[in-house]
Image (cartoon, helix red, strand yellow):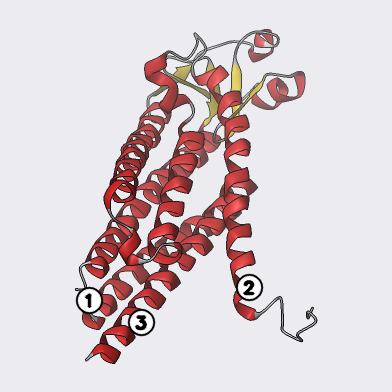
């Protein structure tokens, strides 16, 4: 762990940075996992095929995660990697345009989650004397949110004496209990997306004020407590996914909380260093 000069290679700071960028890499890997899930789900929710205008609705989680990762890296550049005087000219405008693109995608992805919520709440009773007759057809049933499986003999026997519900415009059926669970998870998705938008809006304001030299301790304290409420809500969202949702959703939510904790530390350190530099000049 030391070189010839008896200097530590893996200092506390180096280990911390390795840990931070490992989290970022794990978030990048989640994009692939969400693509696999979205692709499987889109074959059922868009049985007639996905048109270009429906791509973001069909692959909401994939596109949303990719845009969020780019936005996270932009925050990392501004709050840690780049010096303040380097964020000028072409680089400054490149960051702004990329950020604008990411926010456009993220906001539209939020719309995609809302669209999914509307889809899951647009249902009608499914009338069929024998569900087992649907085995081998294009009908599927909801196992959990974004997971629609083909009907099997085991499933049809389970659903045989249960009042069923069909999602309008699809060939997806479910029972009332599973529908309610799926609707709740969809509500959690919308809540998560909207809450993160508020969080990054506050971060954007902090970065803007910091670059202008107007991020005071009072403003930091105010935003800190406001974000504390938002992060607490996001923590409960992650917990709900851990209990009721899929492991991937819980893992992804947990990683994002850690990732933006790094950004919070960056801003705090950035502000502290700037204030010390100003004190030394005065």
Is the C terminus in the top left, top right, bottom left or bottom right quadrant? bottom left
Nearest to N terminus: mark 3 or mark 1? 1
Please, which residue is most extreme toward the front here? 5
Helix or strand or loop: what does disc 1 sit on? helix
Disc ID at residue 272: 3
Measuring from the top left, give residue 33's x and y in whole percent: 63, 38
Q: Is residue 90 left or right of residue 147?
A: left
User: Would you name the residue on which mark 2 appears?
Assistant: 14
User: Would you name the residue on which mark 1 appears?
Assistant: 219
Is the N terminus in the top left, top right, bottom left or bottom right quadrant? bottom right
Q: Name the residue located 67 percent from the left edge and 19 percent from the top edge.
A: 150
Helix or strand or loop: what does disc 2 sit on? helix
Q: Does residue 246 appear in this view?
A: no
Question: Gap in Å between the C-alphas at discs 3 and 2?
Answer: 20 Å
User: In which image quadrant can residue 137 be found?
Assistant: top right
Measuring from the top left, give residue 118's x and y in whole percent: 35, 30
Q: Name the residue located 33 percent from the left edge and 38 percent from the top edge.
A: 101
Please name whichever residue, 139 or 217, is drawn nearer the observer in this view of the structure.
217
């Amino acid at each position: 762990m030391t070189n010839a000069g008896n200097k530590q290679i893996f200092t506390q700071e180096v280990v911390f940075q390795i840990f931070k960028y490992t989290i970022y890499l794990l978030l990048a890997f989640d994009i692939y996992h969400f693509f696999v899930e979205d692709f499987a789900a889109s074959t059922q929710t868009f049985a007639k095929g996905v048109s270009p205008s429906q791509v973001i609705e069909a692959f909401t989680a994939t596109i949303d995660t990719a845009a969020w990762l780019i936005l996270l890296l932009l925050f990392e550049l501004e709050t840690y990697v780049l010096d303040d005087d380097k964020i000028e000219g072409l680089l400054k405008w490149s960051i702004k345009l990329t950020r604008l693109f990411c926010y456009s995608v993220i906001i539209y992805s939020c719309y995609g989650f809302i669209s999914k919520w509307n889809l899951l709440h647009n249902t009608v009773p499914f009338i069929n004397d024998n569900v087992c007759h649907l085995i081998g057809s294009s009908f599927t049933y909801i196992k959990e949110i974004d997971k629609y499986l083909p009907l099997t003999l085991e499933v049809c026997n389970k659903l045989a004496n249960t009042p069923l519900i069909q999602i309008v415009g699809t060939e997806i059926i479910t029972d009332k209990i599973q529908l309610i669970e799926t609707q709740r998870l969809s509500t959690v998705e919308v809540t998560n997306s909207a809450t993160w938008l508020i969080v990054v809006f506050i971060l954007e304001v902090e970065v803007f004020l910091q670059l202008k030299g107007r991020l005071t301790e009072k403003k930091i304290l105010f935003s800190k407590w406001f974000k504390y409420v938002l992060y607490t809500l996001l923590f409960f969202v992650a917990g709900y996914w851990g209990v009721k949702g899929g492991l991937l959703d819980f893992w992804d939510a947990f990683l994002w909380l850690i990732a933006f904790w790094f950004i919070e530390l960056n801003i705090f350190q950035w502000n502290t260093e700037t204030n010390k530099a100003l004190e030394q000049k005065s």
